[in-house]
Amino acid sequence: MKILTNTQSVQIGGITQYNALFQQFLEKNNKEDTHMIGVDVIRKYSLHEELLYGRHTDGQVTIITQEVSIRRIQDVLPIIKSVRDIEDEYQNIIEIFKKIIKAEKPDLIVINGTYFIPWCLYLATKSFSIPIILHYHGIITKETETWNLHSHSLMKQMEQTFDNSRLYYIFPSNLAKEVVENEVFGHQIHQSAILPNPIPANFFDVNILGGTRNVGIVARWTDIKNTDFIKKFAELNQKNHNFFKINMVTDIDQIPNKDIGISKIINLHHPMSAYKLGEFYGIMGTIICPSTFETYGNVPQEAIATRTPVLIGSSMGIAEVFRRMGLGYLITDFTFVEDVFEKVKEVAKLGISDKMRRRFKKTLSPDHVYPQLLNIYKSATR
């Protein structure tokens, strides 16, 4: 079985990690009957740069990289009127995907995510009668809720085009499926599966006793990650004579100028490898994830794997796992920053037991999750 999918070369991103773990699973388990082709379209925003192409095969995985010169979608949306205009704007990406699909002749196409590059892959598939799976790693309608009305409307319309009887859908949580049904497509989805994201093995190997006053955050600096709460928490901490030492892993270059002053009250760290991230979690007494919405949430389960407690919001898919595992007490209302401040003090003292860590490893390791994923892929190609 040959699987073609989109991938991306960034460290702080769920799709990147998901594909990398799947690649490791294929190699570890010697799945010679399965070959994955990852297509990484690298955006270049200058017309004068040389556009490079690369292809590398390692075992059961081939990575194709293609640089493409485009305009930022944030610059495009204000000056266009329709989803068709988005298609016209990025026709070069669609043609790249078409060319690769034609050359590789995959048995299955897996679309990872709903942003405009996965959407271009989806449009390219319309020229072929190949089974398609859409793996929801994020809901762009939710991600863009705070954008201006025109841009948000266009992004929602773009996501609504994924409503197609040809597609089979994978969701990381029931919450994600329900939101797509109710807020994007407007009807029930019948061809679908719920499959949580796996936890990389290295997080279970961390054995560091974190300081109870160390608070960690791992998130992109975007509205959906509730950056307003993060700022308020840091400001309250400053008023409390820096009771906590707050550390945040984020893409520092993406923090807007109006928020860059946050570096004075939060220790900011650039995105790091999974191994360094495991050490980061281990050093912390508590991790906080105040997102207003997440289809799933890898950070909370990774932190639990290192035995560091995590406060999460109820509008995160991972909350379903926490309830099943008996960690419902960590699901938190982030409305009142003072209450959260006190709760962090409490849960830092509790930690996470070895028994709970073992339960997470048993049910969410790649060796447990990816055989289920492979079965879904195989069923789609029959």
Image (tube, rainbow, N blue to C red):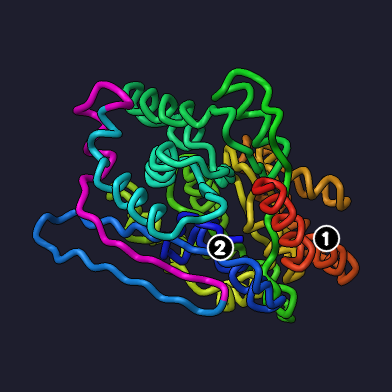
Q: Residue at x 76, y 68 (%)?
A: 367
Name which residue type carries label 2.
Asn
Residue 37 image offset from top left, x and y in percent: 49, 63
User: Residue 326: in sight, yes or no?
Assistant: yes
Asked if residue 242 lies left or right of residue 41, the reply is right
Q: According to the image, label 2 marks what residue? A: 19
Q: Mark 1 or 2, which is nearer the eye?
A: 2
Q: Residues within 10 Å of mark 2 (few under 14, many from 20)?
A: some
User: Residue 238: in sight, yes or no?
Assistant: no
Asked if residue 239 lies left or right of residue 94, the reply is right
Tell me which segment is drawn in magenta: 60-84
Q: Residue at x 56, y 53 (%)?
A: 107
Q: CA distance from mark 1 to mark 2?
A: 19 Å
Residue 77 inside the magenta-drawn segment: yes
Residue 154 image offset from top left, x and y in percent: 36, 26
Name which residue type carries label 1.
Thr
Residue 135 image offset from top left, x and y in percent: 59, 45
Quadrant of the image occupied by residue 197: bottom right
- The residue lying toward the viewer, choosing from 62 and 237, is 62
Residue 212 image offset from top left, x and y in percent: 70, 68
Asked if residue 58 lies left or right of residue 357, the reply is left
Q: According to the image, label 1 marks what residue? A: 363
**Residue at disc 1, secondary structure:** helix
328 over 363 or under it: above or below: above
Residue 181 inside the magenta-drawn segment: no
Q: Earlier in the sequence, mark 1 or mark 2?
A: 2
Q: Residue at x 47, y 48 (%)?
A: 231
56 over 321 or under it: above or below: below
Q: Residue at x 74, y 63 (%)?
A: 304
**Residue at disc 2, secondary structure:** helix
Looking at this view, name the residue that lies furthest to the left. Answer: 48
- The residue lying toward the viewer, choosing from 7 and 255, is 7
